[in-house]
Structure formats: structure tokens, C-alpha cells
Amino acid sequence: MNKYEKMWQDLGLDVELHNELLASIDKTFQQTVGAQKDRPEEVKYFDHVLHESHGGRVAELIEARKQGKKFIGTFCIYVPEEIAMAADTIPVALCGGTQFSIPYGEKMFPRDICPLIKSTFGLALGKMCPYGPIKDLGVGETTCDAKKKVWDVVNFHVMEVPQKKGNIDIELWRQAVVEFKQKVEELTGKKVKSDRLGETIKIMNDKRRALQRLNEFRKHDPPPISGLDVLVVMQAALNDEPVRFTGHLNTLNEEIEERVKKGISPFSKGVKRIMISGCPSVMGNWKVHSLVENAGAAIVIDETCTGTRYFENLVDEKATDLEQQLEALADRYLKINCACFSPNDERIDGVLNTLRDYKVDGVVHYILQYCHGYNIETIRVDAALKQAMIPSLKIVTDYSEEDVGQLRTRIDAFLETLD
């Protein structure tokens, strides 16, 4: 019997089905992440975060709520975590990346929408999500049409992400950030104060700095850590307590620095260097990263929401009053180059700069099925890549294993063109 089964029962979960879910995820984890060799020792902590995401982390949140804190479930990296934390609230990403729960999601939602949506809400509809029963507020945003309509069904607070980045759009987004502050103040009965917000801004900036340092190491030839292991770190970043996470990441970074000095790497020098570009790979989803690296290449950077978009920009810490801090937060989060923006020249420029910085040999567009924004935007990205003479491969897939053989063949063929 799992030591958390009583907790799950109290939360109203279908414990038997939930155990099947965990077994399914663990099997996938062992076949992908766990099958790697030459892993850094400290990366095991981040494995632990993933394995405890439905256990120890939930127990922590339950205890925090007993102490008077609130828990916010988020669905996108546009939600300013600093504001939630400053109001004595704990933000945690709710995104699901497992095929196991999708049939339950399809009992309510259409089959032909994003698997991330179906997986996440399938966990709730199948009584397998321990976060739903303890969530005090759900927060969504307007980055795609499917999600916008889902928020109506599940009654989330919605942050209006504009579709352009002109002056009127900047003001719209700043207002959305102010409204989010007001929402968490209403939820908690506590005011967001400038001194505490300054502290949480630094906490999150320190977390981003540590992630930036981790990714700087990937510029080495060969990179001292696999792209799959970095993905595990990024997935843990969306779930773990941020100060604790940053402490362990700083320890991992020290270990990786030593690996660089000693020439320790899971790859050989001259390995083909791949950028993953497009959709996020959230917890439970390691398919494409595993296939690419098992084919003999190294993923050296992720231009995704479980990659550079999460950590590449810092919030200006020089702001001295609440209004300035909120503007600094809004400005930082609006720099995230989601495919929802049009025109999206900033994303194109960012892709080109990143592939040069990381000496990328080829780009794999990772597109979740029915994600029209990223799928269509590959046309412009590919045009820029062609001009830069960087080959690319577009993969449109879901969370299932049904296309693994086909994807393996396509990836092998693509890597051969890089010789």
C-alpha cells in the first residue's frame, strides 16, 4: 500500500485508478529518463520531485493550507508567480503530460483538441488529480482558443494575454496583471505589499538565474548533461517549492561545472546538436527528447515553455514602489514569445540568436497535435532557418506511443542529413 493512499482517499480520488496512472507514468519514466547512462548524481533530486508530485508535494500543500495559505493552480507560464507568492499563496502548474488520462478527458472535451488540455482535465474527470480538491483558485490565460473555452467550463480566473505587443496591448496586459493581484488579494484577504513583492521577485529571479546557468553549460562540446535530464529539471521547476528548487539546482550546477572540467558527458565530442522548438513537454511527457537522444544526437537547448521561455528574462529588481514593480513584472512576462502573437518577429529573432549561441546543427519542431499556433508558425520559423542554412524536422504528435516507430525512423533519417 502506498503511504499516501489515505490522503488520496480523503481527497476523493479513485485510488485504484490513480495507482494505475502512477504505474503507467513510472513505466514511461524508466524507459526514457531512467534508462540513461552517465547522469549527474544531483539530478536524482529532480527525479524525486517528479515522483513525489502526487504524494509529498500534495501533502505539503495540504499542510500549508492548514496554516492559512492558499493554493493556486496555474496553466501557463504567463501567470506571475511573484504576485501569488507575495499574497501568501502557492502557485503550482497543473499541466498533464500523460496519455493515460486522455480517454477520461475525451468524455467531456472534443477529441480534436490539444492533448495537454485533455490530459490535464482527464486527470480531474477520472478522479486522479490530487490538486483539484485542494485548489483555491485556478488561473488560465488566452493563448489559444481551446483553452479560452475550457476556462468557461471549469470556472478559472482568466488573464487576458494580448495578441500583439503595441502600446495598447502593453496597457491591456498591465491591467490584467493588476487584476490578478486584486484577485489573489480577494482570495487571501491580504494585500500585496511592495517589500514582500520585492522579495518574491528576487526569489524567482534567482531561480531563473540558476536555470540560465544550467543551460549555459549546454553550450559546451560535448554538453555535460543530456537534454532529457534538463527537461526533468524544467518539469520539476513547475512543481517544486522555488527556494528549495533553486538550492538543489545550484548544487547540480556545481556538479556540472566539475563534469565540464573533467570532460564527463553522456555524449561524444562532435555530437550532432539539436534545438527543440515549439510546444512544451510537461511532466509525464519525455517521448521526443528520448527519441532524439537515443538516435545519437544531443538536445542542447529547448525553445519552449519548458525551456528558454520560462527563464530567459528577469524582472527588473530596481523598482522601488508597488506600481513600478507591477509594471516591471508585466513587462517581463510580456517578453515571453508565445505563438499566440501576431506578428511574432521577436520569436523568429530569438530562435536565430539561440541557435547561433548554442551552435545548433538542426532544429526539431515539436508540435502537439491540434496546436495550430505553433504548427502554422513553423512556416515563418522554417523560412528563417533556411536562410540561416539550418535544417529542420517538424514532428506533430500527441502523448501516445503509437507513432514511436514512425518518429524513430523520421528522426534517424533527419540526423543522417546533418552529416
Image: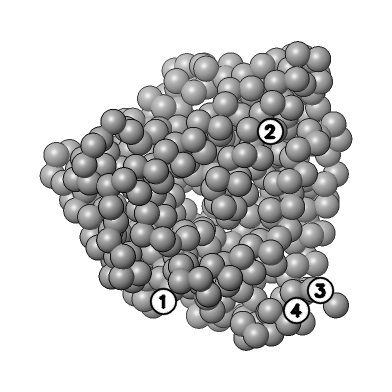
Q: Which residue is mark 4?
A: 5
**How busy is the neighbourhood of tag 1: few (under 14 within 10 Å), some, or many (20 plus)?**
few
Asked whether residue 416 is in view, the answer is no
Provide the secondary structure element on which disc 2 rests: helix
Residue 194 position within the rendered picture, expressed as x and y whole percent measured from the top left: 27, 47
Q: Earlier in the sequence, mark 4 or mark 1?
A: 4
Q: CA distance from mark 1 to mark 3?
A: 30 Å
The amino acid marked with disc number 1 is: Val
Q: Earlier in the sequence, mark 3 or mark 2?
A: 3
Quadrant of residue 35 within the rendered picture: top right
Which comes before the other along the chain, label 1 or label 2? 1
Could you classify mark 2 by the number of other residues whose Cα lies within 10 Å: few (under 14), some (14-19), or many (20 or more)?
Answer: some
In the displayed structure image, the side of residue 374 where residue 294 appears, left or right: right
Q: CA distance from mark 1 to mark 2?
A: 39 Å
Residue 154: mark in rendering: 1
Q: Which residue is disc 3 drawn over?
A: 2
Relative to 57, is 315 on the left or the right?
left
